Amino acid sequence: MTRSDRLTIPAVAGAAARTGALRMAAVVLLAASLVLTGCSAPGAPTGGSAPTTGATDASPAAKPVTARSGGFTLVPAAHWVEATDRAGEVAGLDLVVLSGEQVAAFNNNLVVTSTEGSAADLDAELARGRDQLAGAGREISEAPDQQIAGETATGFSSAFEEQGIPVLARSYGVLHGGRVYLLTLSSSPDEADHALVELGAMLDRWQWT
């Protein structure tokens, strides 16, 4: 898949994302579709096993990427690339970064959306997302809090199948500067631990602007 190609969003996610409704559920489905596209960076390695220890560190050439909202920057983990422009029409889409390393035909990815809001809006988004995904038959469980440049992000995990392939998504919400940021990290269950390490490496380099 080339950089100019658009990533496919499942129909239910696309409709919800375009209208701004069911935002958390839409983001989770978008993230799952990114896992399954097989979109890798040109020249990036592929294979059946996870990278070795230390591969999550940013490469010397890695530079910060800026969210569409201008609210933050982050440095992608090694072998990850920005893919925001390939994600189609999603309400509030702020940033998409995608691993260029395929493991069992999966590309780990992080999708971030943002909108103006309050602490009450954040709580409502997370509660609504859990209810919508549980109602769609997803297996919901707790996810450990994440620290994002001085802010605490809370969330949950959802496990499900997309096109017959198991997917694990970790969804988080955080409030900063009057904006609600929703983050969803998606991977195969077998890659879940490594994906979380890669997320930690990127959150360590997240800066509010």
Image (cartoon, rainbow, N blue to C red):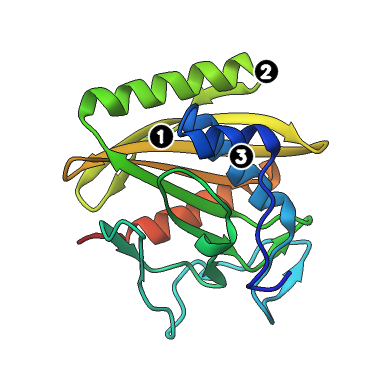
Q: How dense is the environment of label 2, judged by Cα within 10 Å: few (below 14), some, or many (20 and up)?
A: few
Q: Along the polypeptide, which appears first: circle 2 or circle 1? A: 2
Q: Is residue 205 visible?
A: no
Amino acid tagged 3: Gly
Q: Secondary structure at mark 1?
A: loop
> Viewer-nearest of labels 3 and 1?
3
Camera-side residue: 77 or 5?
5
Q: Evaluate if marks 2 and 1 touch, with contact meaning CB atoms under 8 Å apart.
A: no
Residue 136's place in the image compared with 177, above or below, is above
Q: Secondary structure at mark 2?
A: loop
Query: Is residue 49 toward the left or the right of residue 168 in the image?
Result: right
Residue 10's place in the image compared with 131, above or below, is below
Query: Is residue 17 toward the left or the right of residue 165 in the image?
Result: left
Q: Evaluate if marks 3 and 1 touch, with contact meaning CB atoms under 8 Å apart.
A: no
Q: Looking at the picture, how far across and down is residue 117, in whole percent?
A: 24, 34
Q: Secondary structure at mark 3?
A: helix
Amino acid tagged 1: Pro
Q: Residue at x 50, y 49 (%)?
A: 196
Query: Is residue 142 toward the left or the right of residue 175 in the image?
Result: right
Q: Along the polypeptide, which appears first: circle 3 or circle 2? A: 3
Amino acid tagged 2: Gly
Q: Residue at x 59, y 61 (%)?
A: 86
Q: Looking at the picture, how far across and down is residue 177, in whole percent?
A: 16, 45
The part of the image, by quadrant, that contains residue 202 is bottom left
Q: Looking at the picture, how far across and down is residue 42, in whole percent?
A: 67, 79
Location of the C terminus by quadrant is bottom left
Q: Residue at x 24, y 22 (%)?
A: 120
The part of the image, by quadrant, that contains residue 146 is top left
Q: Check disc 2 and report the residue beneath it.
A: 137
Camera-side residue: 144 or 116?
116
Q: Check disc 1 and report the residue beneath it.
A: 144
Q: Check disc 3 and report the residue beneath it.
A: 14
